[in-house]
Image: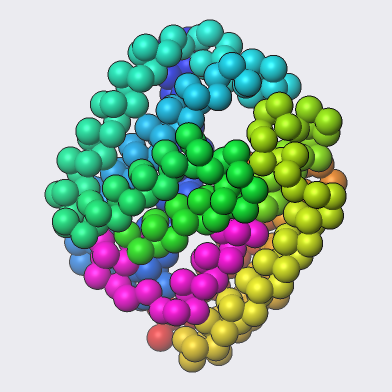
Amino acid sequence: MTKITSYLKLLRPVQWLKNLMLLFPPFLGGTIFNEGLFLAILLPLSSFCFASSATYIINDIVDCTADMEHPVKRFRPLPSGEVVVGKALMLAGLLLISALFLAISVSVKFLILLLAYLAVSLSYTFIFKNYPLFDLFSIASGFILRLLAGGEAFGVAISEWLFLTVFLLALFLSTGKRYSEKKALGEHAEFHRKALAAYPTGFLDGVLSMTGSAVLVTYTMYVISRHSSLLIYTVPLCCFGLFRYILRVQTGKGGDPTESLTRDLPLLIVGIMWAVMVGWGIYAR
């Protein structure tokens, strides 16, 4: 049982929440309740979950030595010795093959988007995470590719304002994560992630404020473009969520987006309220 738990941790299933981005196009496009769509969700969502878990495993293998010295990451399955590298590689390979098989079952274009996601993720693991700005834009690109893949899988066009909102939100969240890491690791930041040392004092703080402001503007324009009077009332929720995340990051409570959503009760409540209000505004017509 302990071994199974270790392998499950290696998959990082909590990070699968990021793949819900694939459902944004049908949810916001008003087609999420179309007949047969719930079954159609299974293939593309599973494909990205398998692919993302494979990239997390590869990333953990690459970072294994450095993670042994990290105050939190040293308890992960690989640096702690609970799972050996060889078996982790085999699992990653199996997940990649499964992800590609499921992707081609959706469509060729979806497969291309998944391959692009894998290319960006692996480039981040081996190269870009060590370079300032490139690390942030690599993470943001992963969210955008999820959004585009969702549009392809469910036949929904992505509006310009939604594209910009997701892109800027991804930059905002990735900046918050870097800010949190730099703050938590202090003088040891460079050893764990080279890019952290390259960010001067105040830079990430400034980017966090700038991208947060931009997200608020683009999201406001998006809801106005939808011509739904109820959606405009979700803007204050968005504003509160952005401010709450900044407060969480700057007070040292962590900047991981999925952990922030699942462990911070106010953020979780705001997220649920946003989903309910947006759903009501789109579907109760």
Residue at the location (30% across, 73% down)? 156
Out of 184 and 134, give the one closest to the viewer. Answer: 134
Image quadrant assignment for residue 26 = bottom left
**Quarter of the rendering containing residue 266:** bottom right
Q: What segment is highlighted magenta in the picture?
A: 150-173
Q: Is residue 91 left or right of residue 228?
A: left
Q: Position of residue 19 (x, y in %)?
A: 42, 50
Q: Is 143 displayed left or right of 45 in the figure?
A: right
Asked if the stretch drawn in magenta spans residue 47, the answer is no
- Residue 13 horizontal/vertical position (percent): 46, 35
- Residue in view at x 37 percent, y 68 percent: 25
* Along the line of sight, the residue nearer the viewer: 266 or 75: 75
Q: Residue at x 42, y 13 (%)?
A: 85
Main SS category, magenta section: helix
Q: Tell me where residue 225 appears, x and y as whole percent.
A: 49, 88
In front here: 116 or 37?
116
Residue 163 lies in magenta, yes or no?
yes
In the rendered view, tell whether residue 248 sits above or below residue 147.
Answer: above
Above or below: residue 153 compared with residue 13: below
User: Considering the image in quadrants, where does the C terminus appear?
Assistant: bottom left
The image shows residue 77 at horizontal and vertical percentages of: 52, 16
Location of the N terminus (image quadrant): top left
